[in-house]
Image (spheres, rainbow, N blue to C red):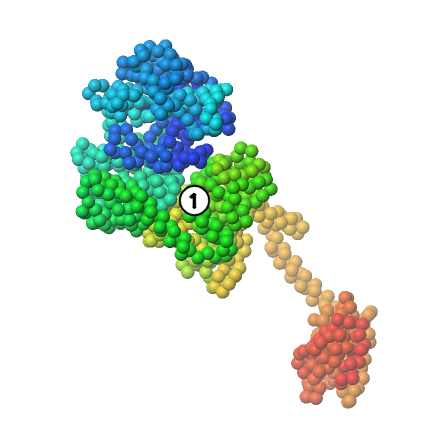
Amino acid sequence: MTSVSDIRSSFVEYFAREGHEVVASGPLVPRNDPTLMFTNSGMVPFKNVFTGLEKRPYSTATSAQKCVRAGGKHNDLDNVGFTARHHTFFEMLGNFSFGDYFKERAIELAWGLITRDFGLPRDRLMVTVYEDDDEAHALWKKIAGFSDDRIVRLGAKSNFWQMADTGPCGPNSEIFYDHGESVPGGPPGSPDEDGDRFVEIWNLVFMQFEQLADGSRTRLPRPSIDTGMGLERVATVLQGVHSNYDIDLFKALIASAAQVTGTEPGGSGVTSRQVMADHLRAMSFLIAEGVLPSNEGRGYVLRRIMRRAMRHATLLGANEPVIHKMVPVLVREMGQAYPELSRGEAMITETVRLEEQRFLKTLGRGLQILAEESEGLNEGATLSGETAFKLYDTYGFPLDLTQDALRTRGIGVDQAGFDAAMARQKAEARKNWAGSGEARTDEVWFAVADQEGPTEFLGYETETAEGEVRLLVKDGAQVDTLAVGEEGFAVLNQTPFYGESGGQIGDTGTIRGEDVSADVLDTVKFHGVFAHKVSVTAGTLKVGQALELVVDHARRSSIRANHSATHLLHEALRQVLGDHVAQKGSLVAPDRLRFDFVHTKAMTPQEIAEVEDIANAIILQNAPVETRLMGVEEAKESGARALFGEKYGDEVRVVSMGEPVGNALGWSVELCGGTHVRRTGDIGLVSILREEGVAAGVRRLEAITADAARHRGNANVAIVNSAASLLRAGPHEVLDRIEALQEQLKRSERALSEARQKLAMGGGAGNGPAQTETINGVTFIGRIVEGLQPKDLRGLVDQAKKQVGSGVVAIVGVTEDGKAGVAVGVTDDLVAKVSAVDLVKAGSAALGGQGGGGRPDMAQAGGPDGSKADEAIGAIRAAL
């Protein structure tokens, strides 16, 4: 038997031998096609190559592409498990020519692979061609030797391919395999073609025209080839089975489903086991790419897939989480071909388990209500849309889950009634909404959110993507265009730009398309809508345009590092200061981070250093930063900490980093919707700049990370080295040398002050002679000195008081800048009748000053006019 893995590798190796570039599978979330929710065919990663927008260093290629069809235009979800060949996830094998070879070579390569390498019998094969494609018809006769009855001509519905309403297009040719007369069904084009006897295994698309807007077609200058072979379908042929669910890969997954539910692989419940096996692949690959279950966008489609599988597990008797136990089997079967499964196994398993727990909590009550409401309905009846909406709105039942639960009883659901109930709820929410701030602007964005719904955010996994302009806003009103030089807001269906929230500022970057480009100056979020503040730099921005979105990578990287660092600092603060520490605000910018927290006193230098050391120790672990989606209460029960300023819905992203200590999820576990590094080592380094108080009981840390922290450290080292050079000492001796110099300076200042005092008392240069006289029986000494600081005057007055024995001393000191100070001393025997305070006020007034103060025995004051020193002495004499 040829295994699925063997078929995949044989296909790719065959075309590699034929000169094709082997290209790895593109992501399931397409970055180059805003019209698609998921990659749904092998050509999606090459779309821009086919249209000429992108050039690659090869002209032929081959790939095994991951695909999902479970939402939007291409949705096979409802058929999965009930048919032999429908899947949510499948692999498309393909070979591609970008203007290199065309029809003849494509048919030769296909025929050689299936008949020579795969060994399929020629008499079991037949093909279809477009009804007007005589060239393809002739080539099949020439290369395969088919007679006319083995080449079926069909119309455009089945055999003409178009990428879109305009653009590349062309006829296609499909290869069918005949499973034999024992299987019901007829050949393609016959009345019973929908049977399982004739199964399409390969589609060859011949892109040779361009569809124009006026309905006409022109020939492409370089026609191309796009082929797609369903791996699961061709495996049924090569393994001699009729159902995709009987191939080796699905046998292993179905056996796992049987094991975890305690049922037999071949017993009753075949459909449920098939659903579990199929949906396991889709959910695991999507989670591996960063899509997490939610109530909107791609996350909602993932949730529908997951809950449909979980519902079928309960039909098999499971009353506890079981599907997550199947993940290791999938990794064993497909992990070698797709390493992202192996890398993400723990994350996939945990995400599935948590979603199962959430679902089982609400399933019982929801099914009870469904049973009660549908009790009187017979086969062919319809459940009311109101009831279906209640299940959706109150119990988290997606509509298709309700439809699936009633399907086995032959009961439908009123889709129109469901949609009407949904519309009424939106209308009521809008009516009750109360705006804030600029009412007109808020009203516009609420209307936008109601009209467009939440923007699909791709920025957790990528910094580049394509998006379609859904609307433009300028000056608080919707507009159709923004011309060059104009500023406004652009809303797209999906974006990698982060909208400011939770303390993290919005992304900047560029958007560009055909003949238009704009700078993204900021990204903000209104009611779930990501609004890009743009300045148009070329062309005209229009609603409906497809644009390439590119986030400023360097800026985003710095923001990620700073945001992740706030989480580490938060936990480190708790460990150093205590559990009372709680975040009160934050700012995450590209150049720094700011973190406000509850604490009643200033941190000591030792505490700051300890916090920094702990955070850097976790950075050095280089541990993975993991994200989980959890219910709010469940997240809090797990020990996750809520962040200030973040508004949480029913579900939250839980970010964990660092090797677990105490909490099994990680060292730091917080609720956070921001962007983060992939590993703690990506932060590089965290350096705390300062710690200060910002309000009563609230402290603030400011810090930098990565290159900024490294540059600061290098700058500090350079300063120390320069200081060491000036001090003629080693860097480790700088502090000791500075302390010694400070002590030496103090001694010198004291000696200088003493010298000045001696000089002043001795009547040196610039100092007037002491004026000693008797006034009202009191000895008075008045003196003017220059070059002394006011603080030195008291010492001179004390010395003079000792010399005079009994009396009053007044000294006016004139500084080098022309100002003056005055000090007055009264000996103890005279303080009862003479106050130094009254005398110094008189002297200060003469100097142009106001007041003065001190004690009755010693007072001091100052004044701005040193030229009035003689007048100050005279005023004191007069007051005495």
Q: Which residue is mark 1?
A: 452
x then y, percent, for residue 718: 62, 47
Whether residue 695 is visible here, answered yes or no, is: yes
Q: Nearer the viewer, residue 291 or 668?
A: 291
Q: Quadrant of residue 198?
A: top left
x then y, percent, for residue 527: 44, 50
Q: Is residue 533 above or below residue 63?
A: below
Answer with left or right where residue 370 lies relative to residue 221: left
What quarter of the picture does the C terminus occupy? bottom right
Q: Is residue 597 above or below residue 166?
A: below
Q: Is residue 807 above or below residue 310?
A: below
Label 1 amino acid?
A: Glu
Q: Secondary structure at mark 1?
A: helix
Crowd rating for badge 1 (residues with CA inside 10 Å; few <14, some 14–19, many 20+):
some
x then y, percent, for residue 486: 58, 43
What quarter of the picture does the N terminus occupy? top left
Answer with left or right where residue 455 lies relative to residue 510: left
| Residue in the picture at 35% in, 33% down | 74
x then y, percent, for residue 353: 30, 44
Whether residue 320 is visible here, answered yes or no, is: no
Q: Nearer the viewer, residue 466 or 762?
A: 466
| Residue in the picture at 73% in, 75% down | 849
Answer with left or right where residue 428 lies relative to residue 880: left
Report the residue that reaches farthest toward the left: 267
